[in-house]
Image (cartoon, helix red, strand yellow):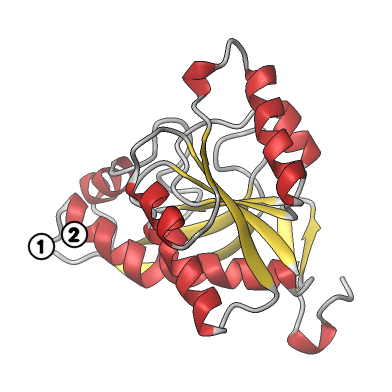
């Protein structure tokens, strides 16, 4: 059984998608051991509490430095026996100690097709605003491993979504969330849990089902 820690900052729609997949039985051999919110009062926190999942608020501004912040997060990871940290709309930056301790065991969902519309400042509604400003015909979402640099870790999965002529940033955000993010994030968790992901440099190799656990 793979224990997950889900990191959130807002409404928790991707958290809900993961919970729904677990409840339906389509996401097997995983459980959400705990949820970490970057600020108090999020709807994601309410979702976790409603599902009887431990939820802790760990706000970066409450710590004097990144070292103590990382250590507090790591203490929760140890207490929950976490095997995979999932950043599901998490807007705080993890420090080097946390990343080193969970190397290749942290994944993030980004609301664009990396390397487009990513990096510092591209979070929340901004990637969708940028996509429309640029006039692209497709956008989408990316699940990737997290390293020391914004949105530069090895890509696991991507899913494209067509941009409509009458899209607003809000309508594009909602469609990407529903058609891409909530599809590929649970899928990436399932691949990790099954031992089907191998990192090779900046690339990932996904094994076939009959090869699971062999790479």
Where is residue 215? Give x, y as percent. Answer: 87, 70
Task: State which quarter of the image contains the N terminus.
Answer: bottom right
Mark with earlier residue (1, 2)? 1
Vertical arrangement, residue 73 with respect to residue 184, above or below: above
Vertical arrangement, residue 136 with respect to residue 65, above or below: below
The structure residue drawn at horizontal position 53% and vertical position 31%, both measured from the top left corner, is 58
Where is residue 55? Give x, y as percent. Answer: 51, 46
Vertical arrangement, residue 102 with respect to residue 140, above or below: above
Q: Residue furthest left?
A: 166
The structure residue drawn at horizontal position 33% and vertical position 49%, both measured from the top left corner, is 43
Q: Residue furthest right?
A: 214
Residue 195: which quarter of the image?
bottom right
Q: Which residue is mark 1?
A: 166
Q: Residue furthest bottom?
A: 210
Check disc 2 and report its element: helix, strand or loop. helix
Label 1, residues with CA under 10 Å away: few <14, some 14-19, many ≥20: few
Q: Which residue is mark 2?
A: 171
In this rendering, would 130 be left or right of 28?
left
The structure residue drawn at horizontal position 33% and vertical position 50%, both measured from the top left corner, is 11
Where is residue 68? Give x, y as percent. Answer: 67, 19
Please tell me which residue lies in front, 171 or 11.
11
Task: Judge whether residue 180 can be spotted in this image.
Answer: yes
Where is residue 27? Give x, y as percent. Answer: 59, 77
Label 2, residues with CA under 10 Å away: few <14, some 14-19, many ≥20: some
Residue 205: which quarter of the image?
bottom right
Residue 214, numbered circle: none
The structure residue drawn at horizontal position 61% and vertical position 67%, both measured from the top left corner, is 188
């Amino acid at each position: 059984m793979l224990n997950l820690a889900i990191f959130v900052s807002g409404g928790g729609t991707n958290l809900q998608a993961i919970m729904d997949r677990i409840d339906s039985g389509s996401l097997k051999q995983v459980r959400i051991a705990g949820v970490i919110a970057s600020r108090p009062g999020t709807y994601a926190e309410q979702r976790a509490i409603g599902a009887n999942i431990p939820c802790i608020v760990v706000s970066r501004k409450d710590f004097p430095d990144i070292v103590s912040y990382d250590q507090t997060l790591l203490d929760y990871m140890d207490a929950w026996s976490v095997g995979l940290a999932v950043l599901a709309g998490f807007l705080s930056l993890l420090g080097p100690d946390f990343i080193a301790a969970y190397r290749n065991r942290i994944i993030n969902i980004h609301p664009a097709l990396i390397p487009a519309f990513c990096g510092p400042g591209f979070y929340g509604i901004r990637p969708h605003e940028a996509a429309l400003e640029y006039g692209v015909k497709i956008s989408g979402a990316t699940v990737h491993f997290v390293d020391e640099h914004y949105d530069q870790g090895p890509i696991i999965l991507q899913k494209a979504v067509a941009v409509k002529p009458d899209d607003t940033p809000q309508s594009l955000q909602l469609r990407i969330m529903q058609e891409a993010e909530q599809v590929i994030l649970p899928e990436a968790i399932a691949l990790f849990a099954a031992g089907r992901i191998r990192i090779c440099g900046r690339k990932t190799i996904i094994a076939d089902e009959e090869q699971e656990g062999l790479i």
